[in-house]
Image (tube, rainbow, N blue to C red):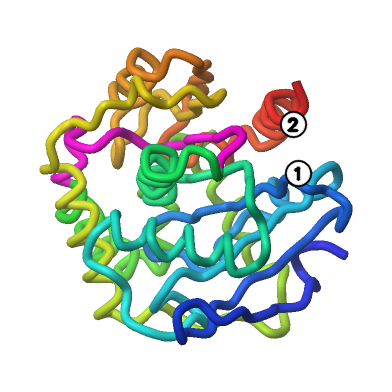
Amino acid sequence: MNLKNVKTSTVNVAGTAFSYRKLGSSNDTVPVIFLNHLSATMDDSDPKIIDELAAKHTVIIFDNRGIGSTGGVTPKTVSEMATDAIAFIKAIGYQQVDLFGFSLGGFISQEILLREPQLVRKAILAGTGPAGGEAISKMTPLVVKDIIKSRFTFRNEKFYLFFNGNSNGHDSAKKYLSRLKERKENRGKSLKLTNFSHQLTAIKSWGLQGAQDLSIIKQPVLIVNGENDKMVPISNSYDLKARISNSEIIVYKDSGHGGIFQYHESFVKSALKFLED
């Protein structure tokens, strides 16, 4: 079973049916919970990464409130999104998990680490940054600009937002976007504009928020990003590394926000080593 054909399940979380997909070994007592990026549904999870992680671990992806096939209205704060994620994890029966948060999912992961540290064994924070981090509050105009550009060029906005504008970036973007189309049946619903707007509001608020005390995070944390991330500048990754004592960092050259997708083979090897050490 892999990402393109795994079944979609649901679980009741405070009266809302949350949709999720579970891959990998059912005997793995500490699953990897993947928290995705701005605008992403489960169908925006990279099969190359999820399938290869699931070869060694249980991996669970899900649509948070108001996203994809999960009902309700998307919260306007990262804190509320973390509340939903915590409730989801407990609803599917886990008392401890590994977190893999990409971009917005990395913001949510930090909230979970700070609020319920006993719930997390290890965490991977990719393409993300701390509350109040450099330029995070300015992400909205950048995103809107590239969405408009994508409409005129008939490309997915991730082509511009996640990858460098050179030949390597373009080639990686095409391969990544092709992988996202592998699942043909039982795909989730598209994100509604209102809920997308709520996500942007949450990101701006996170960027304007005061700094959090990340020194209290004692779990092992792997920080990963591309050196030319224009959505969450690489300075934020170095900031996380400096403030989380038990952390290590990987920076991918000649790559942007989607560095883990461009260098998916290298990333998976590093992620598996980190999770298994």
Mark 2 crowdedness (10 Å alpha carbons): few <14, some 14-19, many ≥20: some
Q: How many marks?
A: 2
Q: Which residue: 82% across, 62% down?
A: 2
Where are the magenta residues, as a range? 120-138
Q: Nearer the viewer, residue 171 or 222?
A: 222
Quarter of the image where the N terminus is located? bottom right
Question: What residue does disc 2 label?
Answer: 272
Establish if 102 lies above or below 77: above
Disc 1 marks a residue whose amino acid type is Leu
Examine the structure image and report whether residue 26 is included in the region drawn in magenta: no
Where is residue 22 drawn, in percent x and y?
A: 74, 64
Q: CA distance from mark 2 to mark 1?
A: 7 Å
Q: Are marks 2 and 1 in contact (CB under 8 Å)?
A: yes
Say whether residue 131 is magenta.
Answer: yes
Residue lying at 69% horizontally and 46% vertically, measured from the top left: 49
Q: Which image quadrant is residue 74 in?
A: bottom left
State the residue at coordinates (48%, 58%): 86
- For mark 1, does the 10 Å Cα neighbourhood hold few (<14), some (14 to 19), or many (20 or more) residues? many
- The amino acid marked with disc number 2 is Leu
User: Residue 207 location in percent, x, y?
Assistant: 17, 42
Q: Is residue 148 above or below residue 111?
A: below
The residue that label 1 is drawn on is 53
Q: Residue at x 30, y 37 (%)?
A: 232
